[in-house]
Amino acid sequence: AEADMMCCAACGTAEVDDIKLKDCDACKSIRYCSEDCQRNHRQQHEQKCKKRAAELRDEILFKQPENSCFGDCPICCLPLPVDLRMKSMVQTCCSTVICAGCCYANELHKGMNAIKCPFCRHPVPATTAEAKANQMKRIEVNDPAAIRQMGVDCCKKMKFDTAFQYLTKAAELGDTVAHYHLSLMHENGEVDEKDEKK
């Protein structure tokens, strides 16, 4: 296969300084020295080309991405899913996003009675009030993920002014997801536009 890439599939001309070979546009598995050679060889190559092009398409389509915009799970180092609501959990104790698989494995390992955060080993809050207290501690130390989450929670409760303040602060601290939520607020008209002349 490597030898096929060194010379023209139609006439056998080798690639040298003055002759540059071009890949087949669809399958990338053979090369030609000219458009005439590609045209003349099309009938012989057509079936193999279609098959290889379909394989390439499937490889690209079904390949798991190397990473996502949310980074990797700090436990298993696999990319976090794009939709964080479906297959991941934000830990209120450390504001770390852990994939659902690692959270499930942690539950199985520790048992339901003494579950701890798989990342920082802090006990998982038993009540919503405990979770909120953890979140407020993270906000006090300027954790952008916790600040953003508070902004999202305020948005859900229709407290748009408070949500805007939290999300703006998280965005200023470098949280890209907070930028996204701010853009949604602007798009939905949930933020009062200020017309300031500069």
Image (tube, grey):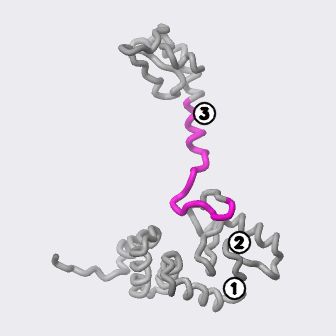
Tell me if mark 2 has few (under 14), some (14-19) or many (20+) residues whose alpha carbon lies within 10 angstroms of its own: many
Residue at 58%, 22% in the rendered image: 48
Q: Secondary structure at mark 2?
A: loop
- Side of 193 relative to 150 (left or right): left
**Figure quadrant of the N terminus:** top right
Task: Return the x and y of residue 83 as percentages of the image width and height.
Answer: 57, 64
Residue at 48% from the left image edge and 76% from the top image edge? 144
| Residue at figure coordinates x 44%, y 82% from the top left | 166
> Gap between marks 2 and 1, in whole Å?
13 Å
Tell me if 116 is positioned left or right of 187 in this view.
right
Q: Which mark is residue 55?
A: 3
Amino acid type of disc 1?
Pro
Looking at the image, is 87 positioned above or below residue 120?
Answer: above
Name the quadrant containing residue 32: top left
Q: Position of residue 130 (x, y in %)?
A: 65, 90
SS assignment at label 3: helix
Label 2 or label 3, whichever lies nearer to me, is: 2
- 94 falls in the magenta region: no
Q: Judging from the image, what secondary structure is the residue with disc 1 in?
A: loop
- From this viewpoint, is residue 10 visible? yes
Q: Which residues are magenta?
A: 53-76
Residue 39 shows up from this direction: no
Amino acid under disc 2: Pro
Q: Which residue is mark 1?
A: 125
Mark 3 surroundings within 10 Å by alpha-carbon count, few (fewer than 14), some (14 through 19), many (20 or more) = few
Residue type pointed to by label 3: Glu
Residue placed under numbered mark 2 in the picture:
118
Whether 50 is drawn above or below 82: the answer is above
Residue 43: image location, x then y, percent: 51, 14
Relative to 5, is 133 above or below?
below
Q: How would you rate the neighbour count of disc 1 (Cα within 10 Å): few for under 14, some for 14-19, many for 20 or more? A: some
